[in-house]
Image (tube, coloured by chain):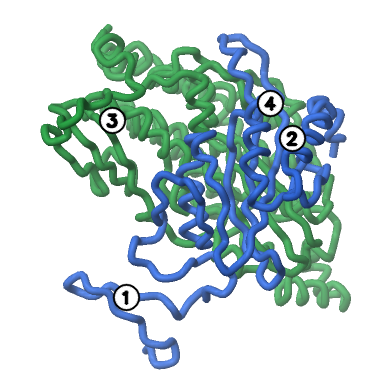
Amino acid sequence: MSTRGTTLFADNPDVQLAPGAEQDTLVLSMGPQHPSTHGVLRVLLRLDGEVVVSAEPEIGFLHTGIEKQAENLLWQQAVTVVDRADYLAPLSNSLCYVLAAEQLLGIDTIPPRARVLRVMFTELTRLASHLVWLGTHCLDLGAQSIFFYAFEMRERILSIMELVTGARMHQSWFRIGGLAIDVPVGFLDAIDDFIARFPQRLADMRAIVEKNVIILDRLVGVGRISAEEAVAWGLTGPSLRATGIRYDVRRAHPYCDYDQYDFDVPTQTEGDCYARFVVRLNEMYESWRIIKQARDRFPGGPVTIDDRKIIPPPKTEIQHSMEALIHHFKLVSAGFNVPEGHVYQAVESPRGELGMYVTSAGGNKPWRVRWRAPSFYQTQALKRLAPGNLIADVVAIIGSLDPVFGDVDR
Amino acid sequence: MPDAGALHPERAALAPLLEKLTEAAGTAFLEAVAAPDMDELAIRPEGLLPVMDLARCHGFNHLLDVGGVDHHPLTPRFEVAYHLTALSANSVERAGPILHPPRLRVRVFCDEPEPAVPSVTHLWPSANWPEREVFDQFGIRFDGHPDLRRILNPDDFVGHPLRKDFPLRGQARRFVPGGRVGPIPPLETRR
C-alpha cells in the first residue's frame, strides 16, 4: 500500500506558497474535453511541479436553463424537464419534484402499489448510477475489465426500465399523484431475474476492484477530508458518509415509506477517495436489499390516486362519460392549479441530498423550482480537495466525488 | 402522512432557538412560521448576519442551499432562501447513530432597484457557489462575497435569466464563426 498520499501531502488544507513563489507555478487548464472530467468540467490547476497548489473548477458548459423551463410548463409537464437534470438518476429527480408538488397539493396518501414501485425504481436508478460510477471511475484509474461487468449489469436495469416505462434513460414515469402507467406483464419475472442475479455479480465486481493493489495505491489517502470540513463544504450522500457522518435523507426525513424498509446506512471514517469508494460499493448492496423487500411486499391495486382533478380518467371511461371527457380536456389543455405556498422536499439521490425548493403562486405552472443539486456542492469542494495532490490524483478525486454535470449546471 | 413532530422530536426543541433568532433579527424580523416541512424565519437583509451567526453557533453547521425566487410583481420582489441543517460531527464512528437532524429555513426579502444581501461565505465556505448562482440568475448582489462572478452563464451574458421579466425565448444570442457574438433575428423573420 502506498504511503505517498498519506505522508507527503497529509496536511493539505492550504498549501500556501511563499510570497513571490507564484512565478514558479504553472497554470494548467484541465478540461472541458478531458475524458476523466465526466462531461464538461474545466479545472484551472495552478501547479508547482506536478503538485496542485490551487484548483478552480469552472462550470456552466451544460447549463440548459431547466429551472427556467420548468417555470414555463404545466405542473405535470415539468416532470419531463426535471428528469433531464441529473441524467444518470432521472427518477430521483422526478421523485423529488412530484413529492414536492404533492405536498403543495395536500395529497398525503398515494396508493401503496405506486409507493412501492417508486421505491423500487429509485433504488434501481441508484444501482444504475453507481454502476456507471464504478465503471467509469475505475476506467479513469486504468482498470478496464470492471467497466464491462458494470455496464452489463446496468444494461439489465435499463432493459427493465424500458420494459416498464418505454424509455431507457429519461423515463419520466412518475406523475404528481402516482405513476404514468402500471407495470406490464412480464415485469415480475424480469425483476426476479435481476434480484437473483445481482448479488453474485456485485461480489464478482468487488473481487475485481476492492482489494486491487493498483486501486488501493491510487485511492487510499488521496483527497482526504475531515467530517467538520465535509459539513462546512456542504457535502452530502456517500461523500459525507465516507467521513463517518451517518446522514441519509431516506432515514433522516423518510419519504415513500422508507422508514418501513430494513436497510443499513454504510459509513467509513477515513474520508478519502477509498472510503467513498467502499461506501458506494456497500450502498449498492443495501439498494439491492430494498429492491428485494419492495418485490416481496409488491401490493396490488391502482397506481394513481382517484382524483379526476389531478389524474386524467382512463380511456374506457372517456369513451362513455361526458364528465370524464371534460376532465381529460381540462387536464391536458390547462392542467391543474396548485395552492399558493412553498416547500422544500429532499430525496437521497445517488449523489447525495437532492432538494427542491418549489414555490407555487397558485397557478397551473410552478412559480419557481430551485434545485439543491448535490453534484454542485461536490464539484465546489474540489477547490478544497485537489490542492496538495498530484495531477493524476485530481482525476481520482473527481471520480470519487461522482459529479454529474447535468446536475451541476442544470 | 405521519406527523412531523412525532418523527422529529428535535423540532420541538427548536422553539427557544427560534425566539432567540427572532430577537437577533431585531427590526429586520418579518415573520416566523412553523411550516409543515420545517420551521422558517422571514427577515430583511439587515438581520441576516446576526441570525445566521446565531444559528451557526447553535449547531446549524450544514448549509444545504441558497436559492433565489423572483416574486415579481409583488414587493419586496426578491427572496433568497437559506436551508440549514444540523449535523453533529461528534458521532464520527463506523456504527454511530443514524442522524435525524432538524432543518431550518431563513427567507430573506430584498427589493429593487439594487437588491443586495450580505454574504455568508465566512460562515460556510459552501455558500460561495450558490451565492454566485443567485447573483448570476437574479442579479442579487452579495456584499462581502470574495469572488462574485457569473457562474452558469457566460461572463459576457446580458441580463438575469431567472427573473420573471426575462423572456423564455427571443432574446438569445447566436455564436458566429470567428468568435464574435451576434443577435438572433426576431422569431417571425426566422425561417
Depth check, front residue: B160 or B57: B57
Question: At which x and y percent is residue A342?
Answer: 73, 54
| Res A73 → quadrant | bottom right
Q: Chain of mark 2?
A: A
Q: Residues within 10 Å of mark 2 (few under 14, many from 20)?
A: some
Picture colour for chain A: green
Instruction: From the image, tell me which residue sits under label 3.
Output: A394
Tell me what residue is drawn at x 19 percent, y 74 percent. B177
Tell me what residue is drawn at x 21 percent, y 29 percent. A391
Tell me what residue is drawn at x 62 percent, y 27 percent. A248
Task: Indicate the amino acid at tag 4.
Answer: His
Instruction: From the image, tell me which residue sits under label 2.
Output: A298
Where disc 2 sits, the SS reads loop
Contact, mark 4 vs mark 3 (Cβ under 8 Å): no
From mark 2 to mark 1, how far is it between C-alphas? 52 Å
Question: At which x and y percent is residue A250?
Answer: 67, 31
Where disc 3 sits, the SS reads helix
Contact, mark 4 vs mark 2 (Cβ under 8 Å): no
Q: Nearer the viewer, mark 2 or mark 1?
A: 1
From mark 4 to mark 3, how far is it between C-alphas? 35 Å
Instruction: Please determine whether, in this image, residue B27 is positioned above or below residue A216.
Output: below
Quadrant location of the N terminus of chain B in the rendered image: top right
Q: Nearer the viewer, mark 4 or mark 1?
A: 4
From mark 4 to mark 2, how far is it between C-alphas? 43 Å
Question: At which x and y percent is residue B108?
Answer: 66, 51
Extreme residue toward the bottom, this view: B189
Q: Nearer the viewer, mark 4 or mark 2?
A: 4
Quadrant location of the C terminus of chain B in the rendered image: bottom left
Where disc 4 sits, the SS reads loop
Contact, mark 4 vs mark 1 (Cβ under 8 Å): no
Instruction: From the image, tell me which residue sits under label 4.
Output: B58
Picture colour for chain B: blue
